[in-house]
Amino acid sequence: MKKSLIALAVLGTSFAASAQVTLGGRAAMEVGNWQATGATAGAASDFRDRTRVADVGSRIILRVNEDLGGGLRAFAMCETGINIDNGSSTGQANTNNANTTTWCSREGHLGIGNRTAEVRLGRQNVWWTQGPINVTGAVYHSGDAVTDLLTGGIGQYTVRGENQIQVVAGPGTGAWAGSNVYMGFMGNSGNLGSTGAGQDMGESVGANLSPKGKYQGLKVAYSQGALVGSFDLQSSDTGIGAAATTSQTERNAWKIGAGYRYSGAKSPNIVSLQYVVRDRTVTPAAGAATKGEENVLMLVGQYALTGGWIVNATYGKASDRKDNNVTVANTGATSWGLGVVKTLSNRTHAMFQYRTIDNKAAAAYGLNGGNYASGAAAAGADSKAWGVGLVHNF
């Protein structure tokens, strides 16, 4: 439940008279265990089991909304990740978590629009990994087996893009609400996705280099009654400026998915299937380009029992990568997860989850989400984790 703030205390009397300011968020903690063992390089590269008391996606959300009349509104949102386990910006591996570094570290935008369409400017989600077709990791747990594989391997450029303009279909578009088209420019983040190659060519590049880095994409979303579906498309190009000595990276990816909420539109019960195809071409400053390609198949199932209990399962399979149409042996992986949820109120639930990734000898997919892992899994290491936790939405 979000609680209205007294705008006078935040932004002044004149603003309080015309705009609504709300504060909300999520507190999520888990007690559990993580390990990544069986590395191809041998036991010296393994991470033996770690027991953790870990933050699993807590955040504070500030929203501002002003009615401009005639159905038009102006709005702003700032979602800031917080670590309530250690009070810092580092995750379980003691490495920096970019989603908890500063204000609006998860998402922040300013926009204007009506019930038909909104224009938003800022750092924004593009929901490659979760959304209505996969609520398991986003709502009930700290992650899921589907998201783990989508954020590993070649990867798409981003699931949360910086310096972005996005046009979003509003609630007046009915079943197509949430569809969007976006474009962004690579900024200081140097975001290149998982295991990315190449360099940031955004506005932070040095003298005599052109800031040509950009990305673009779209989502076609559909939700009507028990049916839900989506199609995503994204491409990016770091660009090469004058006198550049760095490599250039181009990415293309698309995802199609369909789901059925088999007890009605508002039920947590869902079964869904998603399929992703993506490629990455790296052109070095000298030498031939390498084009890598892979695909990922994902399944999600969730079912509500009586008494507020919910059970769910997720499964993903990543193919071996192909470089210049030649299969690179043992670069694929399989993941699966099981979860149990007990709803305690409309805002609070307890949860248990178990997740695992079975990497082939040359693959290094890892459990993802807010620096969830206690270390970067080595090639061939199989990751396993379980956790018992509590989530409170406010």
Image (cartoon, rainbow, N blue to C red):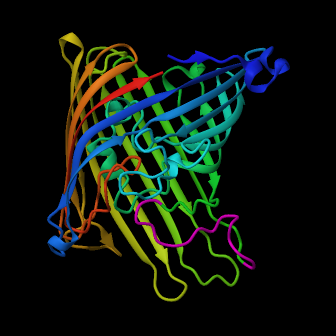
Residue 49, image quadrant: bottom left
Residue 279 higher or lower than 52, as above or below: below
Along the viewing direction, whichever of 344 and 203 lies nearer the viewer: 344
Among all residues in the image, which is located at the extreme front?
A: 86
Q: Was residue 31 drawn as part of the magenta stretch in this picture? A: no
Residue at 36% across, 27% down: 391
Among all residues in the image, which is located at the extreme right?
A: 14
Q: Was residue 207 drawn as part of the magenta stretch in this picture? A: yes
Residue at 36% across, 55% down: 277
Residue at 19% across, 73% down: 44
Along the viewing direction, whichever of 144 and 134 lies nearer the viewer: 144
Q: Is residue 68 visible?
A: no
Magenta span: helix, strand or loop, mainly? Answer: loop
* Picture coordinates of residue 57, whole percent (x, y): 42, 38
Residue 377, image quadrant: bottom left
Q: Is residue 317 visible?
A: yes
Residue at 57% across, 65% down: 237
Residue 120, image quadrant: top right
Along the viewing direction, whichever of 177 and 50 lies nearer the viewer: 50
Residue 171 higher or lower than 307, as above or below: below
* Picture coordinates of residue 91, whole percent (x, y): 41, 51
Give the magenta part as a residue range: 193-208
Q: Is residue 31 left or right of residue 118?
A: left
Residue 174 higher or lower than 327, as above or below: above
Q: In this view, does 267 lie to the left or right of 72?
A: left
* Picture coordinates of residue 357, whole percent (x, y): 21, 53
* Picture coordinates of residue 202, whole percent (x, y): 66, 64
